[in-house]
């Protein structure tokens, strides 16, 4: 891909003569808490994983394990590129700088799809886990959670790190309770994890094919996807050259354990294949213990979902803020999205992602899942391609964390992701492809003719040297 961009030091919106910089206020611990909260292990376990149980049955744990291994290669790419190009723009800043401005723009669009869709997908699960106390409409509850998360996202990042840290402890406790109960009530041996069976609607037992597992990998990649948040926070992390890589890799390892161990326990502890495929984890927990324990776990999950919403809104607002600073839009839009509030947060960008997120709570869930899976896979694919170009030209000797087994790691990852994409449902490929086509048209008609004044990737110049 051509038209690679030399980062513009201090490139900003037209309304200002000086760079708009986010404040470096968090270290590895705060960054890891925020990033883990964006992975939101408990809400992912209770909201997303049940759908995998419904389609993959006993092969769910194996699929998530394979997805986690693929994410190790993805995390290596993110860790190297995130320390090489530490920007709140995340993937798009990395890919634009290394693989071309059009590629970076498409990554931005895919990442925007992901960060706009994932929060409402998670938020709509809140009603299910508040059911022991009160029955609520899922869409209305999800919209309320998104609006609450938007208000919290307007606060100082350090304050949000503590808030999300407290909530994270609760969701880890919930996941641990599920794991302990599942193992304590095991109905089958470890061999069942490889039996690859799923219950059909008519009660029959169907085999889970290798193609089904490959198809499910798009959602499995989404299960631990939030580790990329560390890259979006790179402008607010102290010593980014060191701490971005540490945060990315630590978050992936911790989140994989928090999610995978309970999934194994649930697979072993389900009374039969029909119950496992049904994916009603709240009912399983209650059956293994009592209604009080089931209610406690449900409330912890509800708090975890709110927690995830807060962190995802924070992440998403940084993406929009960076795109405005890099002049992706007409001037009035750039001026608005780049505004910083009294707490140092990009308040207009925060509202711009939170309010539409509330509206998405009224869209069909299956469509949201499908488009998200395709978008995450496509985004990872472009990041892997950018990683192949990260050691050429002026970037070859730039101080940065460097992944092992380069270039074999990104080459293998690229091949696997292309295959995973080819196995996704045509409807979701068409939806995502249509959005990408529209974004390409915007690039061709607006951004490319204004290449000297639009889509100028800015990389903060402070703390660029390693420590």
Image (cartoon, rainbow, N blue to C red):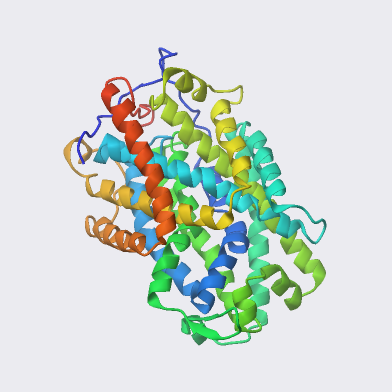
In the rendered image, residue 15, in percent from the top left (x then y), is placed at 44, 13
Residues 245 and 358: in front is 358
| Image spot of residue 25 (x, y percent) | 53, 33
Q: Looking at the image, which is closer to me, 284 or 159?
A: 284
Specify whether residue 416 is in view.
Answer: yes
Residue 408 sits in which quadrant? bottom left
Query: How many badges with numbers are in the image?
Result: 0
Q: Quadrant of residue 426?
A: bottom left
What residue appears at the point 58 percent right and 35 percent down from the top-left corner? Answer: 157
Residue at (69% x, 39% y) in the render: 148
* Quarter of the image that includes the N terminus: top left
| Image coords of residue 47 (percent x, y) | 61, 60
Q: Position of residue 63 (x, y in %)?
A: 45, 70
Pick the front one: 84 or 208: 208
Quadrant in which residue 75 is drawn: bottom left
The residue located at (56%, 43%) in the rendering is: 312
- Quadrant (top left/top right/bottom left/bottom right) for the C terminus: top left
Whether residue 467 is visible: no
> With 134 as the anchor, is 7 left or right in this view?
left
Q: Is residue 54 left or right of residue 404?
A: right
Q: In the rendered view, would you say 273 is above or below 229?
A: below
The residue drawn where x is 41% and y is 78% is: 209
């Amino acid at each position: 891909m051509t038209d690679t961009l030399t980062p513009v030091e201090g490139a900003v919106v037209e309304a200002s003569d000086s760079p708009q910089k986010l404040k470096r206020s968090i270290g590895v611990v705060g960054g890891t808490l925020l990033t883990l909260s964006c992975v939101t292990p408990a809400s992912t376990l209770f909201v997303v994983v049940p759908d995998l149980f419904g389609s993959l049955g006993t092969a769910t744990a194996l699929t998530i394990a394979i997805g986690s291994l693929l994410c190790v290669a993805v995390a290596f790419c993110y860790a190297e590129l995130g320390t090489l190009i530490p920007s709140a723009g995340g993937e798009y800043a990395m890919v634009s700088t290394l693989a071309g401005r059009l590629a970076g723009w498409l990554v931005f669009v895919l990442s925007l799809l992901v960060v706009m869709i994932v929060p409402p997908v998670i938020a709509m699960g809140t009603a299910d886990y508040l059911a022991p106390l009160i029955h609520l409409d899922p869409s209305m509850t999800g919209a309320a959670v998104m609006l609450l998360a938007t208000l919290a996202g307007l606060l100082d990042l350090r304050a949000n790190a503590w808030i999300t840290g407290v909530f994270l402890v609760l969701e880890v406790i919930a996941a641990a309770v599920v794991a302990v109960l599942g193992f304590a009530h095991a109905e089958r041996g470890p061999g069942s994890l490889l039996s690859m069976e799923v219950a059909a609607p008519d009660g029959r037992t169907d085999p889970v094919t290798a193609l089904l597992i490959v198809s499910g990998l798009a959602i499995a990649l989404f299960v631990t996807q939030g580790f990329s948040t560390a890259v979006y926070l790179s402008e607010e992390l102290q010593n980014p050259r060191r701490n971005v890589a540490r945060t990315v890799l630590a978050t992936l390892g911790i989140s994989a354990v928090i999610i995978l161990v309970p999934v194994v326990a649930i697979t072993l502890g389900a009374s039969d294949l029909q119950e496992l495929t049904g994916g009603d984890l709240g009912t399983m927990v209650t059956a293994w213990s009592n209604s009080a324990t089931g209610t406690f776990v449900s409330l912890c999950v509800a708090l975890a979902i709110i927690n995830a919403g807060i962190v995802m809104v924070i992440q998403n607002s940084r993406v929009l803020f960076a795109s405005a600073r890099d002049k992706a839009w007409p001037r009035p839009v750039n001026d608005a999205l780049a505004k910083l509030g009294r707490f140092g947060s990009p308040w207009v960008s925060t509202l711009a992602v939170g309010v539409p997120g509330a509206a998405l709570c009224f869209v069909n869930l299956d469509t949201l899942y499908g488009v998200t899976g395709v978008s995450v896979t496509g985004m990872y694919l472009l990041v892997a391609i950018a990683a192949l170009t990260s050691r050429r030209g002026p970037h070859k000797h730039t101080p940065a964390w460097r992944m092992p087994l380069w270039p074999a790691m990104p080459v293998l990852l690229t091949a696997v992701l292309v295959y995973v994409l080819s196995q996704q449902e045509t409807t979701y490929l068409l939806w995502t492809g249509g959005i990408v086509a529209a974004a390409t048209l915007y690039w061709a008609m607006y951004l490319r003719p204004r290449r000297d004044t639009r889509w100028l990737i800015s990389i903060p110049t402070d703390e660029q040297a390693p420590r």
